[in-house]
Structure formats: structure tokens, C-alpha cells
Amino acid sequence: MSVKNQIKLTIIAMAVLLLSVPSYAESPYPNNVTIEITPSLRHVDTFKINGFSTAITDTASDDFKRQSDEGTEFSSIGLGMSGRVVAPAIRNSDRLILEFDYFRANDMSFTDTNTMVGGELFEIISINNGKQVDDISSSQPGEIISTVSVTHRSGSVAALYGFHLPDNILGHSNLQAEAGLQFIETQDKLAVDQKGLGTFANPTPFSYHYLDEKVTAKYFGPVVGVFGTVPLSDKLKFIGRARTGALLYRSTLDGEQRVLKGSGAVTDISASDHNSGIAYLGKLEAGISYSVTKWLSVDLNANITYLSKSPEIENPHVDAGDNVLSNTFSPVALRTGSSEDAGINFSFVFRR
């Protein structure tokens, strides 16, 4: 079983525990201002690219022969920092809540080697109009070296009002409903540098193909959820939180492509795209909190966040039966998939 699935099962089990315990006469939040500072270690699985706008074809016919790459799917571990400020509201049992979060995954970088033999062409397709930009042939075995790097970062802020649920709601006086607005922004960047090594007949030598694509996605809308605690001892308690929402979603793509030929000529290409819609948010969080002093506690919890819409890049794609010279391929476009972000958080909670 994967680590992500283990985190999911742990959170679900703890949520069931929260809803099955008897009522306790305490608010899930203290009666004073609290400040939470939370460093975290997370796994993110968000960004997909179907290919790098290139293909291998037959020298004699320019017909598709094989893929020059398989694209990439971004999956990495990184460090995050989040925080929460909670203050008493209009009613003593209600709370005003302000949250923030920032996360940056470790940059993913790898090198891929594609060996070409005589009679093959390395074709470069424009991301703007889907037409051939250049081809490079090899009279002897040569190698296309692709260096690929992907970066991911995200940030969010939420303003919420917490309503302390009365004792007759599920019989839990330590549950609090939360409602408000949340804004999320994610940014993913792809950089591909492809160079030729070996004997290339056209041009001699082949210099490079460079592809740079950046995608920014923004989400904004109403969210609702529930937060609760279960005392386990004088100093230890279980904490759980669930949240969902329907968010306005808009993503934008900015792409740049450069081909430097052996003759010294440079071709620069740019392209852009965008899409929008409604994205659904789901978040589960569960863990334990230990009171060190009256003014300080430390929390350890697991969480997972799901977004129904996350941007994916679809570059011009050559497939079986295609001819690069006679066919025009679809330019680069944004597509949508789903994304998950799972992690372990260690929090310091200060009370004033």
C-alpha cells in the first residue's frame, strides 16, 4: 500500500472516531487568541505534460516512426509552511479564523537519452501553429540528450467564521462548523533543453531545442467544513478537520520555444492558452495535540487535499500514421485533470 493511501485510511479512521465519541463540554478552540505555525513535509502529484513537441520520423517519407519522449508527470516531495490565527467572535463560542499556506516542491530534474540511427529524423514541431520547424538527420548513430526540469509552488489564504455547534447537533458540543472564502494559486514550470551529440548530417552540428512552459492556476470561492476535538487525557487530545467547497477556476499557459540550427539561424516561437470552470475542493486532516504549557501546544497530523481541476499541458503530438510535412498538428493547449497533495504537519500553537 502506498504512503498516500495509508495517510487516507488513517484520516478516515480518525474521522470516524471523532463522530462516534460522546459529547464533551468544551469548545474545539480556546477562549483566547491562538496562533498556529506549521512546517510540513508533503507529497504532491499535480503536473502532467504529454510530450515535448518532438518526434522521430523516417528520413525518406517523414512518416511517424516512434516517440522521441514520453512526457513527464510531476510527483515530488517538498516543504511547506502554513499558519492559522483564531480569535473570539461576536458570540463567545464563535471564532474568526484566518489561514495561510505556502508550499514549494523540490525541483524535479532528469536527463533522458534518445539514440538515433541512420535513416531517422528528429522532428521539432511548433507549439504555436503545429507545423514542422526543423528536422535533424543522422547518417550514423547519434544521441539526443534531453535535460528536463519541473518546479511547483502553491499558496492559499482563507477567511472563515466558526460557529460552535450546540449540544443537540450529533450530540457533540466540541464540534464547530466553519464557513468562509478561500483563494488558492498554483504555478508549475517546465524547462526542456535538447542537444544533439554524434554525427548529424543536417545540420552539422545540431545545437539545441529549448522549450519553456509556465502554467498558473487560480481558485476562489466559498468553503464550508467542520472542526472538532476529542480529549484523550489532561494534556492530549485528538483533532480533526474536514472541508469542501466549489471554487471558480482559471488557468493560463505561457510557452516559449527556441530552435538554434547548425547554420546559426534562430527560430523563436511563443504561444499561450487559458481555460476556466468550477473546481471542487476536498480536504481531510486528523492528528493529535499535546499541551506543553498553558500557552503552548504541539500538534502532529496528517492531511490530504483534493482538487477536481488541475492544469495539464498538451503539446503538439505526432502519432502512428501521421506525416510531419503534410500534417498540421494541434498547437499547445491546456487540459484539466485532478490533483492530490498529501502530507505530515508538525504545528506549534501559541495562545495569548
Image (cartoon, rainbow, N blue to C red):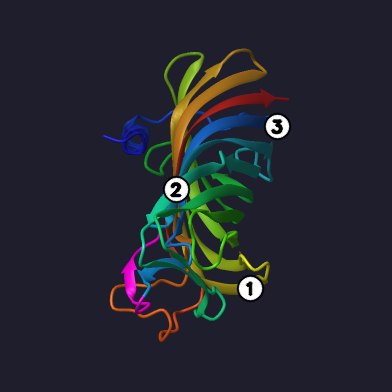
Label 1 Cα neighbours within 10 Å, binned few <14 / some 14-19 / many ≥20: some
Is 52 one of the magenta-colored residues?
no
Residue 221 point in image, percent of width and height: 58, 62
The image shows residue 261, relative to residue 63, as above or below, that is above
Considering only order in the chain, which callout, 3 or 2, is on the residue closer to the N terminus? 3
Range of magenta residues: 60-68
User: What's under tag 3, amino acid-wise?
Assistant: Val
- Tell me what residue is drawn at x 38 percent, y 77 percent: 62
Looking at the magenta stretch, what is its main secondary structure? Answer: loop
- Tell me what residue is drawn at x 62 percent, y 42 percent: 101
Per the model, the C-alpha gap separating discs 2 and 1 is 24 Å
Locate the C terminus by quadrant: top right
User: What's under tag 2, amino acid-wise?
Assistant: Asp
Considering only order in the chain, which callout, 1 or 2, is on the residue closer to the N terminus? 2
The label number, if any, that marks residue 33 in the structure image: 3
The label number, if any, that marks residue 112 in the structure image: 2
**Element class at badge 1:** strand
Residue 308 point in image, percent of width and height: 43, 60
Label 3 Cα neighbours within 10 Å, binned few <14 / some 14-19 / many ≥20: some
Per the model, the C-alpha gap separating discs 2 and 3 is 53 Å
Residue 131 appears in the picture as rendered: yes
The residue where tag 1 is placed is 269
**Element class at badge 2:** strand
The image shows residue 201, relative to residue 84, as above or below, that is below
Q: In the image, 352: left or right of 293? A: right
Residue 7 point in image, percent of width and height: 37, 34
